[in-house]
Image: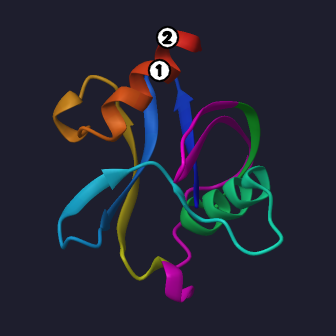
């Protein structure tokens, strides 16, 4: 299972550009695997911190299915930085605030979730 976060601030969404299993490079929401003993919320908080440097608060569960939890979150503190010392972050190329107007960067996975977040926010 995966836990991920959608973080919206002033017309931007925080995204992680990374290699994925099929070999493509895509923009994804920060997140990753739920570890043994973790709740989806705890995994979301940990993964966002590891991938972006931000400490967040999951405000609400936006969506979940048999493989993924997606939370709408707010930033509590921190600064933008990928922790490249973690082996799990080897696939991350960059993290950036993407303008919501850059619809060309959102794919068939991220676009529907982003639209859901924007329509409930």
Write down the residue under mark 2.
Answer: 119
In this rendering, would 79 be left or right of 68?
right
Write down the residue under mark 1.
Answer: 116
* Residue at image coords 29%, 68%: 20
Circle 2 SS class: helix
Looking at this view, is 76 or 32 the one in front? 32
Magenta stretch: give its range: 61-88
* Residue at image coords 54%, 38%: 6
- Give the label on residue 85, or none: none
Q: Is residue 68 highlighted in magenta?
A: yes
Quadrant of the image for the C terminus? top right
Residue 55 location (% of width, % of height): 74, 53
Circle 1 SS class: helix
Looking at this view, is 80 or 28 the one in front? 28
Count residues near mark 1 (Cα–Cα under 10 Å), then give few for <14, some for 14-19, many for 20+.
few
* Residue at image coords 36%, 27%: 112
Rendered view: 87 above or below 95: below
Q: Are marks 2 and 1 in contact (CB under 8 Å)?
A: yes
User: Outermost residue toward the front?
Assistant: 66
* Residue at image coords 17%, 66%: 24
Q: Is residue 85 highlighted in magenta?
A: yes
Quadrant of the image for the N terminus? bottom right
Rendered view: 1 above or below 102: below
Query: In which quarter of the view is residue 36 placed?
Result: bottom right
Name the colour scheme. Answer: rainbow
Rendered view: 26 above or below 74: below
């Amino acid at each position: 299972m995966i836990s991920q976060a959608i973080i919206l601030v002033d017309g931007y969404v925080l995204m992680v550009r990374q290699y994925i299993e099929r070999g493509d490079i895509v923009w994804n929401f920060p997140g990753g695997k739920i570890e043994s003993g973790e709740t989806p919320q705890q995994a979301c908080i940990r993964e966002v911190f590891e991938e972006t440097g931000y400490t967040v608060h999951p405000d609400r569960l936006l969506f979940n299915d048999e493989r993924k939890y997606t939370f709408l979150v707010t930033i509590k503190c921190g600064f933008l930085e990928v922790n490249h010392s973690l082996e799990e972050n080897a696939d991350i190329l960059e993290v950036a605030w993407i303008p919501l107007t850059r619809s060309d960067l959102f794919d068939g996975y991220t676009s529907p979730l982003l639209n859901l977040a924007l329509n409930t926010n």
